[in-house]
Image (cartoon, helix red, strand yellow):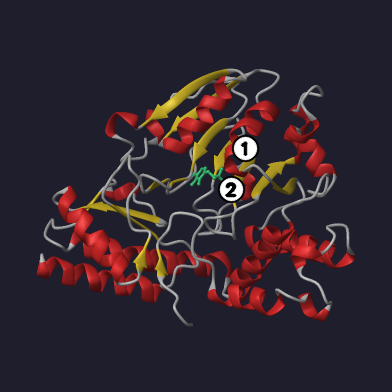
Amino acid sequence: MENRIYNFSAGPCTLPNEVMLEAQKDFYSYKGQGLSVMEMSHRSKTYDEIIVSAEKDLRTLLNISDDYSVMFLQGGATLQFSMVALNLMPPNNKADYINTGAWSKKAITEAKRVGEVNIAATSEGKNFNYIPKQDAFNLTPGASYVHYTSNNTIFGTGFKTEPEVGDVPLVCDASSDILSKPIDVNKYGLIYAGAQKNMGPAGAVLVIVKKSLLERSPNELHTYLNYNTHASKGSMYNTPPTYTIYIMGLVYKWLLRNGGLDAMQKVNEAKAKLLYDAIDNSDGYYKGAAAIEDRSLMNVTFNLANEELEKKIIAEATAKGFSGLKGHRSVGGLRASIYNAFPTTGVEALVKFMTDFKSNN
Ligand SMILES: *Cc1c(COP(=O)(O)O)cnc(C)c1O
């Protein structure tokens, strides 16, 4: 592998080497057919096989039943902030939101344009450094749904288990931890996730929705914003982001080859432990930003004693080929995003670098 750096970017982020090389092999002429996936009609037989097998492999990975529709849409997770509310809030027009960070807040802003939003719990008072606990949730009986963000990319916190919401459909923004561990899809009404953190390049958002909820979408919705449009057309109402979906499909095959989500979870837990242990065993030199019990396995956020030292370590790290470690401006410090495709060797190398930096500074 020539000239590859360790890319800790929060997204778009590192993709599996095997996937990159396979895509490279087929880039110019897909399986000898004389054209690139980028150049072929989305209505062609070849492309149909690509998108159908991507969906099939995803269904296998997450054990998704026929009660659910799977869609590859555009507009990122961000458009889902609106589409979820527009499609699922009616007819009651009230929904519960758990506010655990910047992305939750953006979802709340859009939902408020559609109906009544109850903030069932929030950790904003402590700059989102923890996940509110179940007994603190103030859930509304008869709410259209409960929305939460399973992993908070910016703050480095994550839910260890789904909120318990009774019969109310659970809606999850799983953008930054989808496919990082097994989940029981049957617990959810809807799951959405932008592709560019754990599934592929930017350009697509995955939506998994319980078919029975599709009855809620009002007829007067704009065609493109109505889930039924996409569900009934196999994500082919208009031209889908063909190349992104192709790479997502390769990532799904890579996951299946490597033991699926159980295996992925083990690797992710081991990788995160390496880094959190390095932080916790540094005699306070490095300080984890999130409450220990709510730490994310995907985004490890931490600080040093002062901003000057943080600037210094980021500069030295960058020079050594560790890229994307600067924390989001709302948290400061450092953030190491170690999604599925991020190699264990990269985490080990960062830990060694952090140990050396500490001795020298
Ligand atoms: C990155 C991210 C988003 C935004 O995704 P886009 O695809 O850029 O719209 C939303 N939610 C979470 C949790 C994210 O990490």
Left or right position of 361 against 184: left
Residue 92: x %, y % from top left: 66, 17
Q: Which residue is mark 1?
A: 80
Left or right position of 26 against 233: left
Q: Amino acid at mark 1?
A: Gln
Q: Earlier in the sequence, mark 1 or mark 2?
A: 1
Asked whether the viewer can see residue 215, the reply is: yes
Contact, CB < 8 Å: mark 1 with mark 2? Answer: no
Left or right position of 244 against 165: right
C-alpha span from label 1 to label 2: 9 Å
- Residue 201: image quadrant is bottom right
Residue nearer the viewer, 144 or 328 = 328
Q: Residue at horizontal 57%, vertical 73%? A: 259
Label 2 beta carbon within 8 A of ligand 1:
yes
Q: Residue at horizontal 54%, vertical 47%? A: 174
Q: Which residue is mark 2?
A: 193
Badge number at residue 112: none
